[in-house]
């Protein structure tokens, strides 16, 4: 442990040196740009997937990878969904690493993945992803090791989106303390009442460890602010209007029947709000320090629709980025 602490202090000094360099540094980059890792309890077109689509579509963002965690879905389910959705948008080059899960002691009310048995692997789901399993598979290794490795390769440049329970992030703090000061920023979806926020309820110990860690910067989008925004029938029609694209088709096939059945149907976009607040600080209408309490809804939907379904976009997915 002493060796790890000394290594962390040495790394912190390196980070400080990076910040103080003249002529511009990674930490001086404009808001909403740079390298990102998405750590999420990924679902099919859920709010985590929408956040992933937004970040993958932003030209100024370099998506280093996706790590999955237990929460709304089991890590194996999240991996299968992430692989399929990245393949769908032509980004099969992005690594997906299966992470961990801690099972909460309490099982009252909504319990997410605990409602169903855990799959043996990302290719053994009870129901395959929409359109089938992706051709490629997950990247071997652990999620925490992947995050720490990427951060060490790109000190001061990587923003981590902690969109699910903080299980993987807490392991980074525990097993790789030297990486903590090298993370540029951590983006969370949080809540004023911690007991009301599913991610913290699912793994409270991990959440406490992550929030206590000395990350250089945090951006917390409150659940209360994000919950005021949801995709209604009008915004759904805006998103699916225009030429067919993989994302528009996915919305039509998964959400179209729900809107057709219930005109009052509303698709949550919680984690997509967190991604938007990172990509465009102007989306934030009210913030207390680095805590977002109110969102400009018009600006959010303009960004959302513009990135997911840009004008004139055709039916072919974007080509994979060069390796």
Image: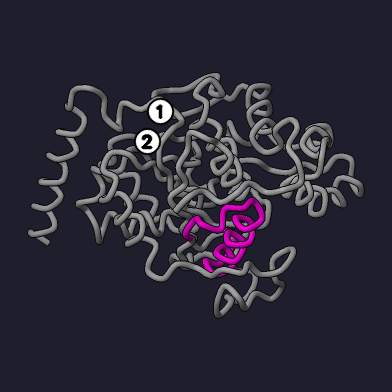
Image: magenta residue range:
73-95
**Sequence-wise, which precedes: disc 1 or disc 2?**
2
3D distance between C-alphas at marks 1 and 2: 6 Å
Residue 85 part of the magenta segment: yes
Relative to 117, is 206 on the left or the right? Answer: left
Task: Return the residue at label 1.
Answer: 290
Asked if the residue at tag 2 contacts the one at tag 1, i.e. Cβ–Cβ closer than 8 Å, the answer is yes
Specify whether 123 is left or right of 5.
right
Q: Kindly state the secondary structure of the residue where label 1 is placed.
A: loop
* Residue labelled with disc 2: 218
User: Residue visible at 55% across and 64% down?
Assistant: 79
Q: Position of residue 170 (x, y in %)?
A: 34, 56
Image-based side of 151 in relation to 52, left or right: left
Crowd around label 2: few <14 · some 14–19 · many ≥20 (10 Å): some
User: Which residue is depicted at the point 68% across and 28% down?
Assistant: 301
Magenta: predominant secondary structure element?
A: helix
Residue displayed at 64% across by 36% down: 227
Residue 164, compared with residue 51, is above or below; it is below
């Amino acid at each position: 442990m002493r060796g790890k602490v000394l290594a962390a202090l040495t790394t912190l000094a390196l980070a400080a040196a990076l910040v103080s360099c003249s002529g511009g540094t990674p930490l001086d980059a404009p808001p909403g740009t740079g390298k990102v890792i998405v750590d999420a309890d990924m679902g099919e077109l859920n709010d985590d997937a929408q956040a992933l689509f937004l970040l993958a579509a932003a030209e100024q963002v370099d998506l280093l990878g996706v790590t999955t965690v237990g929460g709304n879905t089991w890590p194996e389910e999240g991996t299968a969904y992430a692989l399929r959705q990245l393949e769908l948008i032509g980004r099969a080059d992005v690594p997906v690493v299966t992470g961990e899960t801690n099972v909460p002691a309490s099982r009252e009310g909504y319990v997410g993945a605990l409602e169903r048995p855990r799959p043996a692997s990302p290719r053994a789901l009870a129901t395959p992803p929409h359109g089938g399993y992706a051709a490629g598979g997950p990247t071997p290794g652990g999620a925490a090791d992947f995050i720490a490795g990427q951060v060490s390769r790109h000190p001061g440049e990587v923003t981590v989106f902690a969109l699910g329970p903080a299980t993987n992030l807490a392991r980074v703090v525990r097993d790789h303390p030297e990486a903590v000061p090298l993370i540029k920023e951590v983006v969370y979806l949080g809540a004023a009442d911690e007991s009301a926020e599913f991610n913290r309820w699912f793994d409270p110990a991990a959440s406490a460890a992550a929030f206590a860690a000395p990350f250089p910067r945090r951006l917390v989008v409150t659940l209360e602010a994000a919950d005021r925004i949801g995709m209604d029938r009008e915004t759904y029609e805006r998103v699916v209007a225009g030429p067919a694209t993989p994302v528009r088709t996915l919305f039509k096939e998964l959400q179209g029947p729900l809107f057709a059945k219930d005109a009052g149907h509303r698709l949550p976009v919680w984690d997509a709000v967190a991604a938007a607040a990172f990509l465009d600080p102007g989306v934030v209408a009210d913030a207390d320090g680095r805590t977002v309490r109110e969102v400009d809804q018009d600006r959010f939907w303009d960004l959302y629709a513009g990135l997911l379904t840009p004008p004139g976009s055709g039916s072919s997915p974007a080509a994979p980025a060069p390796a």
